[in-house]
Image (cartoon, grey):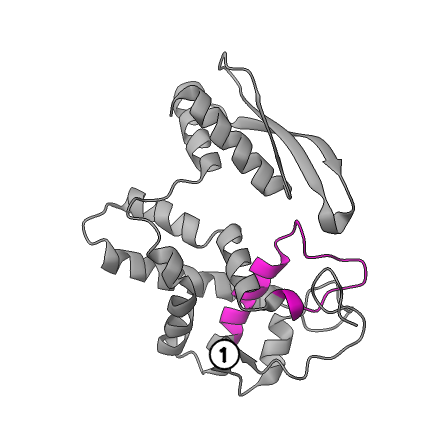
């Protein structure tokens, strides 16, 4: 059956997913494997091995694109751009845009909200395309660039993830890492809500609290608020 919270649960077999966002699979089994979470069925090929390669291919393509678009930037600025573009948050957004939330096969009781499942499946799909086209980087590059183009063009400045920015500041000032604490989690798994706080050990600033639909976004918002308080 199709899970109302996204994904396919039960024993349904993927039969119509040989074309995803413009790529027609010669080997639908690769597509099926990329869309299968380890929780779906024991012994069933799943996306973990494909993800291992897919994130490396994604990084290569994005690194190359950034070097071409920003020929005068140093490695540090390029690294920040790359980290933002290949983050789980961006991959999750792109996965939903191409409909993976309705295609990924997951085990009973597993939900896609508040997880990295879709981001991991997208990376696995990149590797599946790589194998399907015989390792043709031109095909993989074209597929990736078409999906990532809006994000590549979104900002003139190197993006800085709030958590990364706060970590860099904390390490430079106090040789320590920010401390994130989960204060509360409410609601069912598929619609959970998180409250967290962040403090900087060694700083006199009081902790900042924030909320979000998943722990990752709540922590990012808490870090953003702390940076504003610190005037960074």
Q: Residue at x 78, y 46 (%)?
A: 188
Q: Is residue 149 above or below residue 141?
A: above
Q: Secondary structure at mark 1?
A: helix
Quarter of the image with the N terminus in it: bottom right
Q: Residue at x 53, y 37 (%)?
A: 220
Q: Is residue 61 above or below residue 23?
A: above
The residue that label 1 is drawn on is 131
Q: Is residue 158 above or below residue 67?
A: above
Q: Residue at x 73, y 69 (%)?
A: 8
> In the displayed structure, does residue 56 sit left or right of residue 191?
left
Quarter of the image with the C terminus in it: top left
| Magenta-colored stretch includes residue 140 | no
Count of numbered circles in the view: 1
- Find residue 90 and report its horizontal and vertical position in percent: 49, 54
Name the quadrant containing residue 216: top right
- Find residue 99 and report its horizontal and vertical position in percent: 58, 68
Which residues are the magenta region?
Answer: 101-128
Q: Residue at x 44, y 40 (%)?
A: 161
In the displayed image of the protein, which residue is found farthest to the left? 72
Name the quadrant containing residue 13: bottom right
> In the displayed structure, does residue 9 sit left or right of residue 91?
right
Name the quadrant containing residue 11: bottom right
| Magenta-colored stretch includes residue 111 | yes
């Amino acid at each position: 059956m199709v899970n109302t919270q996204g994904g396919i649960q039960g024993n349904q077999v993927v039969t119509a997913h040989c074309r995803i966002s413009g790529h027609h699979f010669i080997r639908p089994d690769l597509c099926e494997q990329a869309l299968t979470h380890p929780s779906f069925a024991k012994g069933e090929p799943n996306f973990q091995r494909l993800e291992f390669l897919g994130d490396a291919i994604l990084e290569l393509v994005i690194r190359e694109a950034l070097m071409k678009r920003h020929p005068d930037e140093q490695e540090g600025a390029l690294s920040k751009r790359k980290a933002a573009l290949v983050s789980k948050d961006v991959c999750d957004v792109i996965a939903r845009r191409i409909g993976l939330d309705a295609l990924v096969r997951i085990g009973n009781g597993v939900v896609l909200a508040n997880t990295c499942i879709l981001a991991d499946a997208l990376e696995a799909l990149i590797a599946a395309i790589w194998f399907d086209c015989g390792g043709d980087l031109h095909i993989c590059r074209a597929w990736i660039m078409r999906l990532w183009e809006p994000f590549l063009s979104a900002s003139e400045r190197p993006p800085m993830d709030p958590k990364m920015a706060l970590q860099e500041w904390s390490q430079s000032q106090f040789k320590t890492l920010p401390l994130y604490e989960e204060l509360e989690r409410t609601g069912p798994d598929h619609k959970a809500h998180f409250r967290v706080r962040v403090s900087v050990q060694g700083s006199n600033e009081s902790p900042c609290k924030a909320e979000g639909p998943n722990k990752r976004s709540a922590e990012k918002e808490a870090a953003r608020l702390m940076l504003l308080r610190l005037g960074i």
